[in-house]
Image: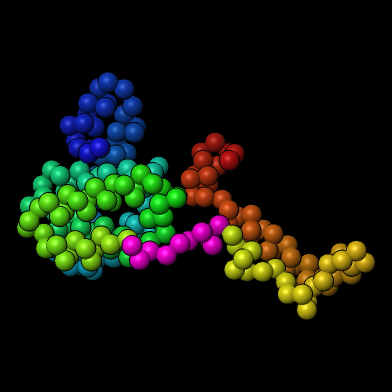
Amino acid sequence: MYINERQLYSYIIFTKNTKKASELLEMAELVRKCCDYFEDCTPEPRSKFPVWFFSTSEWLISDLSELMALFLSIFHSDPLSYGQKVCAAVGFWIRNFPVHFQYDANPQLYRLLERLKKLAIANNFIPLQAVDELLDISSIPSYAWIRNPSARNPPLSSTHLQVSSFCLIEHWSAEEIAKAMSNIEHKVLSRITTGELKQYIKIGKI
């Protein structure tokens, strides 16, 4: 689904949801600004703006698939002027924030990326090699371990802490208790997604 200014204004008229439409219009301007910092299919931008933009994107928009839809909309509306810039910007996004492109986490974003790739290939003025290099996600590793912090940060080794029927918490040193509590807090907080955190900020609960 492509999003352009005409569709957004129609959205305002028929739904009266001016806040949502305004947010999308502002994001569309930011997306276009991000694209403007890329020259043709060059992989690196001329400014640090894209770094800031993609690092805060989860806070700027409710769903990253909406962000990809905006890139698609810009490509579709003006492929001659923005086709290569969009591919370069999305390629930069993939390389620097690959965790956003996990299929299990956001299949819609993954599908929109595939649509962008097909659209780019269909436009002969974009080199096929550049499309393959910029929009390739086949080498993105799995980030499932992020959701299992205890696997990468075990709380305490068996040599430092052995919990058994005869080992009570009062026998632990202050350092051992601090390490155990820090691990519990880290494990809990690491399982909170950005979306859940945004929901908590808005309504005070997850």
Taking the spot 17% from the left edge, 49% from the top edge, the residue there is: 119
Extreme residue toward the bottom, this view: 159
Taking the spot 64% from the left edge, 54% from the top edge, the residue there is: 188
Q: Quick check: is 73 in the magenta stretch?
A: no
Instruction: Answer with left or right where residue 1 lies relative to residue 201.
Output: left
**Along the viewing direction, whichever of 158 and 171 lies nearer the viewer:** 158
Extreme residue toward the front, this view: 138
Extreme residue toward the top, this view: 14
Image quarter in which the N terminus is found: top left
Q: Position of residue 106 (x, y in %)?
A: 41, 48
Occupied quadrant, residue 2: top left
Q: Position of residue 39 (x, y in %)?
A: 14, 64
Dominant secondary-structure state across the stretch colored magenta: loop
Q: Can I make out residue 32 in this image?
A: no
Extreme residue toward the right, this view: 166
Instruction: Answer with left or right where residue 21 lies relative to residue 148.
Output: left
Taking the spot 17% from the left edge, 65% from the top edge, the residue there is: 130
Instruction: Answer with left or right where residue 191 lies relative to residue 63.
Output: right
Q: Quick check: is 143 in the magenta stretch?
A: yes
Taking the spot 62% from the left edge, 69% from the top edge, the residue there is: 153
Q: Position of residue 11 (x, y in %)?
A: 26, 27
- Residue stretch in magenta: 138-147
